[in-house]
Image (tube, helix red, strand yellow):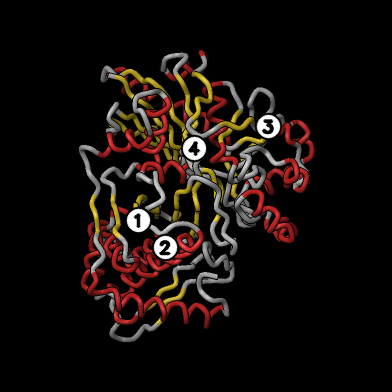
Amino acid sequence: MDSILVIDAGTTSMRCVLFDPSGKVLKVLQKHNPPAYYQDGRVEHDPKTWTDTCTELLQSSAAFAQDNHLHVKALSLTAFRSAVVPVDRQGSPLGRAIMWQDKRTDDLCRRMSPHNQEIFDRTGSTITSIFSSLKMAWIKAHAPEIYSRTYKMAGIQDLLLHLLTGRLVTDHSLAGRTSLMNITTRNWDPELIKLFELDEEKLCKLLEPSSIAGYLRNDAALRTGLDSGIPVITAGGDQQCAALGSGLLSEDAVSANTGTGSYVIGFTHAPVLDPGRRIFCTPSAVPGAYHLEASMLSTGTVYRWFSEILNAGRSGQHQFSFKELDQEVNESPPGSHGLLTIPHFKGSGSPYWNPQASGTIHNLNLSTTRGDIARAILEGIAADIGDNIEVLETISHQVASLRVSGGMAKSQVFNQIQADMLGKTVVQPKNYESTALGAWISAAYRTGLSASMEEAYRTASEDSPPAEFIPRAAFSETYRNLARERKRLYEALYGIPAGH
């Protein structure tokens, strides 16, 4: 039986997911590989651990395929975005990778802020220390000997594509997170490259997402046990693939991928720029299409933080589980007895962009239960998601449903809270491997297994239709009042109208 093997490189781990022709997961192999965090804000990674981990997981996947009479028809890659590793002409790293969370470029980011509008008009995104351009500029300024020897500035996905095919290429969905690609022409922008004082020849060649980046070269085949010459597809960045895997293929829906943080993503066929620069526009994993992307810095991590506080001093069977916490959330009424939470524990991202914001739990009293607090945290997360959807609808299209993915999508109580607060049907896929599934959809379409990405998604969903959570009208007034109170609280705390 033919199969497609997906490589999903995350920030702290890498996975290989083997799919059958209908999009069913046959095997998941995972290895943790976290970066190094430093007190001064640096976040770095040894690139060799990525290539070694990828090779090891592919070896195990090839052995599983052989033992189960599976033929790997294609490889499909997706990865986190905005890391930078300089490489030489042989694709060998010249230093440690600078990760997307790295803060060393914050000062440079502030100095570049007068160019924010120009950068936004050309790229669909404002200047941010997360994106790759400032990391490249930092290397040129602080490690000129490395910059002079650099053949290409690669990301994690680009590095792995070279490992497998020998080509140093990147796709539009990844380049859209560099501040160097023009959102309209989908080419490297000479004016932006000049602005950041970089050299275009050091940037990887651009491809459409879902392109065949190359074919598995002989030495990689020998190392992994896979067949030489199979196509290797660049499926797109992880968030774009997660949206695709959740079925975001039209403008009448949005997706919310909620784990440590959250990404709220809308779909559009042409670039749409937010006049308020609250939401970014970036290329989709669907060739030629775009996403409106809002990012929230701390959402699911706040719920985990509260769970960890409850478990302080507990061990073994006495650990308080998320299932138990969700049950106590159900015992608290909508509105959490007037409790309000602003879950900005690491500052706020979209649509506020307020680094001074912090976490707030308001209206505590002696009758407050842990179920009230837990529910208020979930309602605060849902409110942030709702604020971003409201902005998205203002600048683009009205949407009827929210497609959810990520770790928090497993929580039925959170999904119902989102439906009630947002007044939209929440669609919960049965397959939680949304990022890997998006990469499978990309490969199924590119290799001719499916006639379109829509058909590939339908095929993968036939045997496991998604669950739907319908808004309950009885709670709409409670949540409208809660939204007004929350906006007043935010403005009182920060002097900034919520959502602006």
Q: Nearer the viewer, mark 4 or mark 1?
A: 1
Q: CA distance from mark 3 to mark 4?
A: 19 Å
Which residue is painted at 35% across and 45% down in the image?
A: 246
Q: Secondary structure at mark 2?
A: helix
Q: Quadrant of the N terminus?
A: top left
Q: Quadrant of the C terminus?
A: bottom right
Q: Nearer the viewer, mark 3 or mark 1?
A: 1
**Which label's residue is closer to the chain start, 4 or 2?**
4
| Residue 402 marker | 1
Q: Secondary structure at mark 3?
A: strand
Q: CA distance from mark 2 to mark 1?
A: 10 Å
Q: Give the residue pinned by disc 3.
A: 152
Residue 187 locus on image (x, y percent): 65, 37
**Which label's residue is closer to the chain start, 3 or 4?**
3
Which residue is painted at 43% across and 36% down in the image?
A: 8
The answer to whether residue 319 of the structure is visible from this angle is no
| Circles 3 and 4 in contact, beta carbons < 8 Å | no
